[in-house]
Amino acid sequence: VQTEARLRGDVSNLRSERDTAIGEGAESKRKVTLLEEEVRLLKARVARLTHEKIKVERDSRAALSLARSMDNHNASDVDYYKRKVIDLNEHLQSKNAVVSELRHQVDEYRRQMERSMGQNRLAQTWGEGMNSSANRRR
């Protein structure tokens, strides 16, 4: 009778732990879904910024080329284009910094997603282990 009561208590505790693990697994899945969406948005932003960076580089090269061809012309025009090249290069550097930061964020979100997926696997393994040990006791 005491053994049966103790076993019922153990089963109740194990069910509670299983329910907790299932809840944590569901929460982790939701987090993974949110992180995947955030990664998708960041990738789209990186692609957009990369495209913009390429455009800025092209504009910078065009401005530099134009500045070189204008060397024989009016000095004030050349100065304008040189300033334009400097401005575009500064803009390019700032875009490169943004792209670098976004790549860092994407890497961080990937690491978070991998950790969360590992926790999901652990929760599933824990839940399966509880189910199999409960089945063996029957």
Image (cartoon, helix red, strand yellow):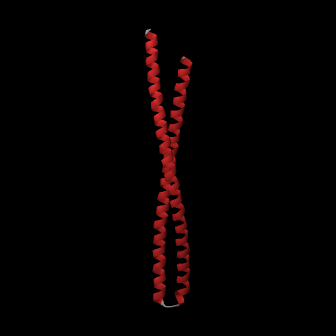
Q: Nearer the viewer, residue 86 or 129?
A: 129
Q: Quadrant of the N terminus?
A: top left
The percent position of residue 30, horizontal first and vertical second, equals: 48, 43
Q: Residue at x 55, y 66 (%)?
A: 51
Viewer-proximal residue, 44 or 23?
23
- Residue 126 against residue 68 in the figure, above or below: above
Residue 82 x %, y %: 48, 81
75 over 10 or under it: above or below: below
Pick the front one: 130 or 71: 130
Residue at position x 46%, y 36% in the image: 24
Seen at 46% across and 35% down, the residue is 23
Q: Nearer the viewer, residue 64 or 103?
A: 103
Provide residue 2's location: percent of width, then percent of height: 43, 10
In this picture, is 92 found above or below 101?
Answer: below
127, above or below 63, in the image: above
- Picture coordinates of residue 44, whole percent (x, y): 53, 59
Number of numbered callouts drawn: 0
Location of the C terminus by quadrant is top right
Residue at image location 54% in from the left, 17% down from the top: 137
